Amino acid sequence: MKILIISYDFYPENKPNAYRWFNVAKRWKDAGMEVFVISANKNQFLSYEEIDGIKIYRSTEYFVGNIKYKHRENIKGENHFSKHNNSLGLEMLFKRGIKKVYDFTWSKFYWPDYSFLWYFSAVPLASKIIEEHKIDKLITVSWTFTSHIIGNKLKKRYPFLYWLADTIDIFSFNGKINNLFLYNKRNRSIEEKVFRNADCNTVLTEKIKQKYVDFFPEIQHKIAVNHNVYMPNSFDYEKENKQDSKTIKLLFLGTLTEEARSPKRMLAVFDRLIKKYSEYNFILDFYGEFTDTIDSFKEYQHLLDKSVFLNGFISRDEVNLAIKNSDVLLNVGNKNEFQEPSKLIEYMYSGKKILNFCSIEADTSLELVEKYPLKFNVYSDDKYDENLLTNIFDFLNSSEEIDKESLKIILKDYLLDEVADRYLRIIKNEQ
């Protein structure tokens, strides 16, 4: 079997799409299949390389896309959030200026999303690979939705291909994808074409499937559920005995944005919690991308570099060590009620306590952590009262634990073997 995967994000990027599909592809390669991948070079990656037997091709987004990544902000907390550094610097101001121009011009008119220029280089490259290597299975991964536009074009050109359209992030009923005033009907129309033309469509949750069934009831039989993936490791996450019982270390990993995953509510709660229990030393370490939330953090300058520490992305080994050295893991739910939070799976596998801040009433993180005993949910309508602070503090100091066997049962559907085999059954028409 020869499989071509088209995904805008791919290894070595530290993103859910890249992590999920690199590991699935690697498992298939180890099982004897030949796997090809087309991704975007994003002005930084090689046009071709082979990693763990996976043949990875990367094509350009042309001028605007390349400029976007050349001047992309990658803010490291200590350089820009420190209370001792109130100046962003000329370089940062320049980048912010470019971003504002981009947001108020280009981003108002592109379709279907910001990666659409990639289509024009990916389609001819994919056609060449399909013809030269006799590809028989095509998989397109959204997000970004441009991958599905590419897949739709290739399916028309090569109708013999089995096409699996994997939707990790929704499109036509997502209000933040593009200019809905211009493209709302077009979004709905093209997504329906994708669902009709693909041999099968996979989504992450039953809730998302039901939403699509409501939209396109006549193609219900073409929609399947396959969850996010987590690849177990043998790392020992158990923290060594605490020497200072008055220190509570909390950890956040991932991306924060004002629109989808804002830290405002969490920071407000911790500001009060730290004042209420001033005899305790609260340490909140943030690792990831926080470019869009600078202003929210600056509202709590008195906490920065004292209780709140902001850093950039870290390696896989550093992530494991950071989780091990923490007492509690922080999660901020997504305002998109149709997104399965992949980071929570990793949190749960560590066996650590999880403090989960819900962004909306229908927060998808609630469904995922429901079976996990070591969690405390701060709901979107919870008041900032003394009872909430007391309950959070009691949770932070609790000594409950969970064993590895229980974790495996809870997370069975999310482990790599199950997810990869489920995809394979689908493309072999064995589901």
Image (cartoon, grey):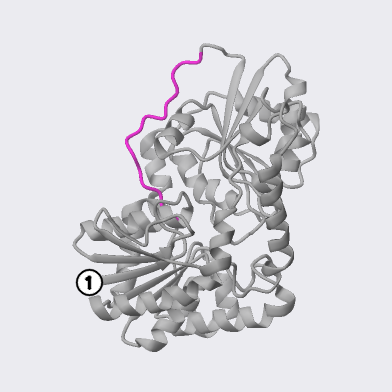
Query: Which percent across, then down, holds residue 410?
Result: 43, 46
Q: Nearer the viewer, residue 90 or 416?
A: 90
Q: Nearer the viewer, residue 24 or 362?
A: 24
Density class for disc 1 (Cα within 10 Å; few <14, some 14-19, many ≥20) is: few
Determine whether 258 is above or below 251 in the image.
below
Identify the residue shown where x is 45% and y is 28%.
324
* Secondary structure under the numbered disc 1 in the rendered image: loop
Identify the residue shown where x is 60% and y is 79%.
215
Identify the residue shown where x is 72% and y is 61%.
101
Query: Which percent across, then down, holds residue 170?
Result: 57, 67
**Residue 236 in magenta?**
yes
Q: Which residues are magenta?
A: 228-242
- Quadrant occupied by the N terminus: bottom left
- Quadrant occupied by the C terminus: bottom left
Tell me if residue 262 can be seen.
no
Query: Which percent across, then down, holds residue 166?
Result: 45, 69
Q: Nearer the viewer, residue 254 or 381?
A: 254
| Three-letter amino acid code at the position of disc 1 | Met
| Image quarter of residue 234 | top left
**Residue 226 in magenta?**
no
Q: Which residue is mark 1?
A: 1
Query: Which percent across, then down, holds residue 69?
Result: 55, 56
Q: Main secondary structure of the magenta part?
A: loop
| Image quarter of residue 274 | top right
